[in-house]
Image (spheres, grey):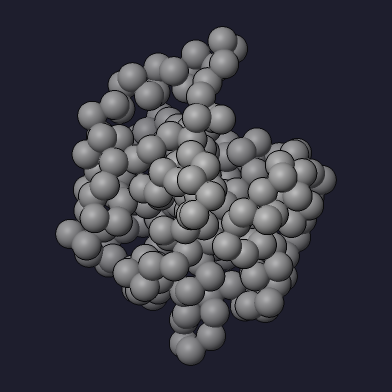
Amino acid sequence: MSRILIISTAADRMGDSGNPTGVWLEELARPWMKFIDAGHDVTLATLGGRPVPVDPNSEPGDDEQDLTDFRKAHHETLAAPTALSSVKAEGWDAVFIPGGHGAMWDLASSEEVATFLAKAWDSGAIVSSVCHGPAALVGVTVDGAPLVKGRKVNAFTDSEERGVGLDGVVPFMLETRLRDLGARFEAGPDNEPHAVRDGRLVTGQNPFSSAPVADLVLDALKEG
């Protein structure tokens, strides 16, 4: 059994726009369920232990009963996650960061998150994320250089951001920022599953990439 830490956004608004946001439910739920089904231990954390808001646009449809069941089963955990400050960065086999636009505000700008992820990486953990989750990586440095520099990385693309009409709302364009940091950004077609792995770094492009990212994390865990 491996220990996996999920760090979620706790931001429920898109900055000054006031638009509601949060975690994208599929990006949190499907990897979590895959990790549990594989026999691993999962802990959920946010900055300050604040509740995890679910983006209203990601509420499950009638054909997504698994997501509805997940939310009901983990309601108490989502309402009272562990505070990241109370968790040691060392000792985790993997760290996973789901997306949702909220990550662009709290996780991307947090020195606490950047420091935690750098320490987790240095301790040998797999670092993984999907969609807007890689926003948490933009401030992470390892050996004086951005963690993403020279590594294959994927995330919500600039094209996809423009497609949802939020390119004028987000604080920065995630694909552009990752490229500026030296990442080898490997985009797939818009709104299609696409995930990449570069050693212990695993990233995915959009909500449809959530399960593929989890599968790559599970593969990396098996390799030890």
Q: How many marks?
A: 0
In this view, the residue farthest toward the right is 189
- In terms of depth relative to the viewer, which is nearer, 120 or 19? 19
In this view, the residue farthest toward the top is 62
Drawn side of residue 184 relative to residue 198, left or right: right
Residue at left 48%, top 89%? Answer: 144
Q: Using the image, determine if residue 89 lies above or below residue 115.
A: above
Residue 2 at x, y = what percent?
Answer: 33, 48
Residue 168 at x, y = what percent?
Answer: 68, 56
Which part of the image, by quadrant, shows the C terminus? Answer: bottom left
Residue at left 49%, top 35%? Answer: 55
Drawn side of residue 195 relative to residue 104, left or right: right
Please indicate, yes or no, whether residue 198 appears anywhere in the rendered image.
no
Which part of the image, by quadrant, shows the N terminus? Answer: top left
Drawn side of residue 151 relative to residue 103, left or right: right
Residue at left 48%, top 74%? Answer: 139
Residue at left 57%, top 40%? Answer: 210
- In terms of depth relative to the viewer, which is nearer, 183 or 103? 103
Q: Using the image, determine if residue 1 lies above or below residue 179.
A: above
Residue 47 at x, y = what percent?
Answer: 30, 56
In this view, the residue farthest toward the left is 86
Please indicate, yes or no, whether residue 176 appears anywhere in the rendered image.
yes
Residue 134 at x, y = what percent?
Answer: 55, 59
Q: Using the image, determine if residue 74 lies above or below residue 194.
A: above
